[in-house]
Amino acid sequence: MSLADIIATLIKILVVIGAIMVSVPMLVWLERKLVADFQARIGPNRVGPYGLLQSFYDGIKLLMKEDIHPANVDLALYLIAPVVMMLPALTIFAVIPFGNKISLFGYTTDLVVADLPVGALYILAISSLGVYGIVLSGWASNSKYSLLGGLRSSAQMVSYELPMGLAVVCAIMMASSRAPGSLSLSQLVLAQTGGIFYWNFLWWIVPGFVAFMIYVICGIAETNRAPFDLPEAETELVAGYHTEYSSMKFAMFFLAEYANMLNVSAIATTLFLGGWQSPIPINMPIPEGSLLETLGPVFWFVTKILGFILLYMWLRATLPRLRYDQLMRFTWKGLVPICLANIMVIATVLTLYYGPTNG
C-alpha cells in the first residue's frame, strides 16, 4: 500500500466517523420535530433557529452532568459496556460503499473505507456484537430493572439476527445472477446496475420484496426501535438496560442507537436498493472524474438512507409497542419460516433460469 493509499484511507475514515457523529444529533432533532408534528405539538423551538441546536445543547448538558454510578456495580464491565455498544456502530460503515469513485489531484480512489471481499459476512459479524454492550450494562448495573432489560435485548437480538441473516443471504443469492460468488458490497451494488427494475428488492417481484421487508422488520427490531423497543420499555422497566447510567455514558448508548439506525438503513440501501446508483439511469455528458460525477452517487445514497430514517420515525409515532410474547412468536413462527421458504424459491428460480445450461 502506497503513502497516497494510506492517506486516502485515513481521510475516508475521518469523513465517515465525522458524518455519523454529526448526523446523530441532527436525527434526534428531526425525530423530535416529526413526532411533534404527528402529535400536533411544536417540538424543539428555543435553542437556535427552529430548535436546530437543541440536540447539541443536550450533548453539552450531558457532558457537564455529574457522572455517578450505583454502589456494588461491577465497575470494569459497567464502564466498558457503553464502549462495546458504540464501537460496532462506528465500524460497520467501514465496508459500505457510499459512492462510486473520486478523483483529486490525479489520484482516484473508491468511496469505501475497505472493500472487503467478504463484506457481507463482516456486517453480519459486527452487527451481532452490539448485544454484548446491552447485556454487560444490564448485568453490571446491579439493578433488576437493568438486568431484565439486558436479558430481553439478548433474546430479542439473537432471535431477529437469524431471519436478518437469511434476508442477507437472499440478497446475495439474487445478486449472484449478475455477480456470481461475490460477497463484496461494492460488487453487490454493481450487480444492481441498470435502474430500479434491476434492484434486488424487485428481483422477480415477490421473492425480492419479501426478503427486503423481512430485512427492514428485523433491522427495526435489531435497533430496539418502536414497535420493538421492549428492552427499554419505560412503562415496565424504567429505562431498561441503561437505567443506572448517567452523563456521557448514557449519551453513548443514545448515540449508538441512532448510529445503528444509520447502519441498518445503509445496509438495506446497499443490498436491496441499488446502493449509490440512481433509480433512473440517465446518460449525461459528465466529464469522467469530475466533482459532479462523484456527488451524484453520494446524493442518491444519502437520499435513500434518509428515506429509511423517516420510516423509522413514522413507525415510532404510529404503532404501539408489542407484547414480549408477540415479539418472539412473530420471529420464530412467522419470519423464519417465510425466509426459509423464500430462499427455496430464489434457489429454484436461479437453478431454472440462471443455471449453467442457461448462461
Image: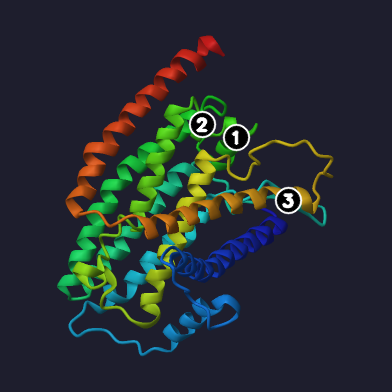
Residue contact at pointers 1 and 2, CB within 8 angstroms: yes
Q: Secondary structure at mark 3?
A: helix
Query: Which residue is rendered at x = 40% and y = 43% of the image?
Result: 215
Mark before the other along the chain sequence, 1 or 2: 1
- Asked whether 1 or 132 is in front, the reply is 132
- Disc 2 marks a residue whose amino acid type is Leu
Mark before the other along the chain sequence, 2 or 3: 2
Q: Nearer the viewer, mark 3 or mark 1?
A: 1
Q: Nearer the viewer, mark 2 or mark 3?
A: 2
Residue 15 figure quarter: bottom right
Query: Which residue is rendered at x = 23% and y = 49% of the image?
Result: 327
Q: Is residue 334 above or below residue 95?
A: above
The C terminus lies in quadrant: top right
- Residue at the left extreme of this rendering: 144
Mark 1 sits on what residue?
Answer: 196
Mark 2 sits on what residue?
Answer: 202
Q: Is residue 168 visible?
A: no
Spot occupied by residue 193 in the image (x, y as percentages of width and height): 63, 33
Mark before the other along the chain sequence, 3 or 1: 1
Mark 3 sits on what residue?
Answer: 294
